[in-house]
Image (spheres, rainbow, N blue to C red):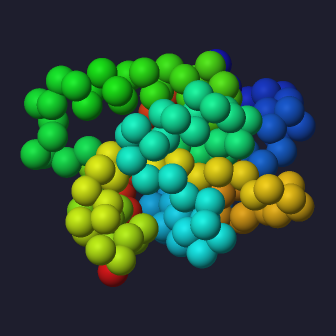
């Protein structure tokens, strides 16, 4: 439900969703937050790259997954098998309360998460897992979770994010 600009509803909305009032300020660039979250997870070895590798982790330990990124580019738009995998991954993420976004530039994603493009040939799905100790907070990832939550309220279940240029 989207509230109209009414002082009564606005107060309720701010009370029920206190971070929503700062949403526009914090999410001016979800692409930048995604890049920061990917780099942070990569430095802490919490990234899983690849459709099959991601599916394996989601099946074995879904509670360890914090965030999912699906990457697509024009070359693979007609790949029916990949689209089926994406549908299954999206469904799994929805069922397990895992935030999920889509990016349209897989090559840019590869540039961010990998040193060698060959190593990340299947970078269509990237997972960010939780740290083992559980004592970690990533502000960029928190912004992305808020962005996804707000997008779902607007019935955009898998929002698309543009990654920033170099």
Name the foreground residue: 132 vs 109. 132
Number of numbered labels in the structure image: 0
Q: Is residue 11 above or below residue 47?
A: above
Q: Quadrant of residue 99?
A: top right
Q: Is residue 159 above or below residue 111?
A: above
Image location of residue 155, percent across then percent down:
51, 24
Image location of residue 40, percent across then percent down:
61, 71
Residue found 19% across the figure and 48% down from its top: 73
Which quadrant would the C terminus be assigned to in this image? bottom left
Which quadrant would the N terminus be assigned to in this image? top right
Image location of residue 56, percent across then percent down:
52, 35
Q: Is residue 33 above or below residue 130?
A: below
* Outermost residue toward the bottom in this view: 166
Q: Is residue 51 left or right of residue 117?
A: right
Name the foreground residue: 18 vs 117. 117
Q: Quadrant of residue 36?
A: bottom right
Residue found 82% across the figure and 63% down from its top: 136
Q: Quadrant of residue 154?
A: top right
- Asked whether residue 7 appears in the rendered view, the answer is no
Image location of residue 23, percent across then percent down:
66, 52
Residue found 42% across the figure and 68% down from its top: 113
Q: Is residue 88 above or below residue 159?
A: above
- Asked whether residue 158 appears in the rendered view, the answer is yes
Residue found 53% across the figure and 48% down from its top: 127
Q: Is residue 160 left or right of residue 146?
A: left
């Amino acid at each position: 439900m989207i509230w109209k600009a009414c002082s009564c509803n606005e107060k309720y909305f701010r009370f029920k969703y206190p971070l929503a009032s700062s949403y526009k300020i914090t999410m001016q660039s979800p692409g930048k937050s995604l890049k920061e979250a990917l780099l942070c997870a990569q430095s802490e070895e919490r990234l899983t790259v690849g459709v099959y590798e991601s599916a394996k982790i989601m099946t074995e330990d879904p509670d360890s997954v914090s965030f999912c990124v699906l990457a697509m580019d024009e070359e693979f738009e007609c790949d029916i098998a990949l689209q089926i995998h994406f549908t299954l991954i999206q469904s799994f993420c929805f069922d397990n309360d895992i935030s999920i976004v889509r990016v349209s530039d897989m090559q840019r994603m590869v540039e961010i998460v990998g040193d060698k493009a060959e190593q990340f040939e299947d970078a269509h799905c990237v997972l960010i897992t939780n740290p083992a100790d559980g004592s970690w907070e990533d502000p960029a990832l928190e912004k992305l979770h808020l962005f996804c939550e707000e997008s779902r309220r607007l019935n955009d279940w898998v929002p698309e994010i543009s990654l920033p240029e170099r």
